[in-house]
Amino acid sequence: MLLQCIANMAVDHENEMMLRKAIPAIVRRTESTVDMECVVALQALTNLSSSITPEQVNLYVPCIPHALNKLWVKGEVNLHSLKLLVNLACCPDLVPYILASK
């Protein structure tokens, strides 16, 4: 429930500075075996990753392998992972990490 709150707050860019400290914890939630927790973590990261600064790159690198691993679920594209990967790919500093992960 708290993770959903963070995902909702992340939509507003004014909350970005406050939520930046939570990114490592949110990234860890992408590893969850609970599907809903993983989905909400991906949503939160997607909302937070719309404007990544060079200082934030290292915060997002650990979520790349998890997003790639969850890209195909039960033979279907996982749109939550895809949205996050699209946002991450819009940051030129993260593209080499994405390419190196697969």
Image (cartoon, rainbow, N blue to C red):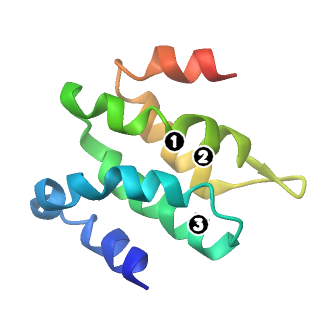
Q: Is residue 96 above or below residue 34?
A: above
Quarter occupied by the N terminus: bottom left
Q: Percent position (x, y) of residue 63? A: 51, 41
- The residue wearing badge 3 is 39
61 or 94: which is nearer to us? 61
Q: Which residue is found at the position 29% from the left and 58% from the top?
A: 22
Q: Percent position (x, y) of residue 11? A: 27, 65
Closer to the chain start, of discs 3 and 2, is 3
What's the mark number on residue 63?
1
Q: Which residue is found at the position 36% from the left and 69% from the top?
A: 7
10 Å crowding of disc 3: few (<14), some (14-19), many (20+) = many
Q: Percent position (x, y) of residue 4? A: 41, 78
What's the mark number on residue 82?
2
Quarter occupied by the C terminus: top right
Q: Is residue 22 left or right of residue 30?
A: left
Q: Is residue 15 above or below residue 2?
A: above
Residue positioned most to the right: 75
Q: CA distance from mark 3 to mark 2?
A: 12 Å
